[in-house]
Image (tube, rainbow, N blue to C red):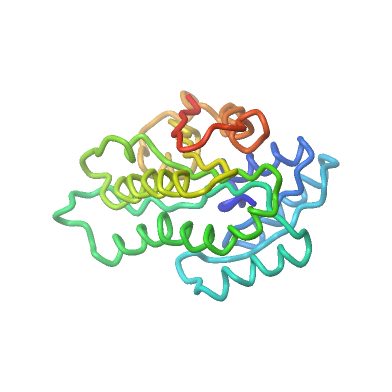
Amino acid sequence: MITGAGDGIGAEAARACARFGATVILVGRTQKKLEAVYDAIAKDGCPEPGIAVIDFAKAQGDDYQAIADALAEQFGRLDGLLHNAGILGYLAPIEHYEVSKWMEVMHVNLTAPYILTQALLPLLRRSSDPSIVFTSSGVGRTGRALWGAYAVSKFGTEGFMQVLADELDNMRVNCINPGKTRTAMRRAAYPAEDPATLKTAADIMPTYLYLLGPDSQGVTGKSLDCQ
């Protein structure tokens, strides 16, 4: 399962995993974008993916459980979970950061992955080689002025990963830092930056495949950089 699979890194991760034989569950808030990724995977001749539409900013507990129940009925287990969905909010000093935007960013980036993970843990435990991967950031390790709720949410992501890794036996739980990558979020944060100087989503896929695949067996509680 890959959240935020409609475009950018999530879409590329979905296609990369599918090329290696994974049946991918595409999760996102925009049906049309998910269908485009679905079509691309089908065109590649890969296993038919599934689609789950959910808006993490608005979803309630029953919405998460409905996804888990549908997976249980159709597949019986879940082998990997990539938490890729997230929002930037905006860059501003803490003094001027709107409370409502702070709460939205913290919910989408930190609380929603917690709820989804909790709902899916029973299915992950049915796998012989389960892996959970959270998307982190350099500003989630060293705080930086103006990065506000996004940075704090990624500090929380790192901590959540460490707690889970310490709690869960026979399950890998790790963080991944994509680094400077040619994505819409990067453009929003650095509008004056030349995107041609950045790695593409395809360039950084080896680290994602490593953490989701069997080569990383025994690696847990770590935070890895793609670049």
Residue at 64%, 65% in the rendered image: 68
Q: Looking at the image, how many numbered discs can be counted on the residues?
A: 0
Decide if residue 54 is on the left or right side of residue 157. right
Decide if residue 139 is on the left or right side of residue 77. left
Foreground pick, 85 / 79: 79
Residue at 55%, 45% in the rendered image: 169
Q: Residue furthest front?
A: 169
Residue at 47%, 30% in the rendered image: 224
Residue at 49%, 45% in the rendered image: 134
The quarter holding residue 96 reads bottom left
The spot of residue 21 in percent (x, y) is 79, 39
Q: Residue furthest right?
A: 45
The spot of residue 165 in percent (x, y) is 47, 44
Compared to 137, does 62 lie above or below? below
The quarter holding residue 44 reads top right
Q: Residue furthest left?
A: 95
Decide if residue 55 is on the left or right side of residue 209. left
Foreground pick, 171 / 88: 171
Compared to 191, does 49 lie above or below? below
Foreground pick, 32 / 3: 3
The spot of residue 184 in percent (x, y) is 48, 44
The spot of residue 31 in percent (x, y) is 65, 63
Compared to 170, does 215 lie above or below? above
Foreground pick, 212 / 29: 212
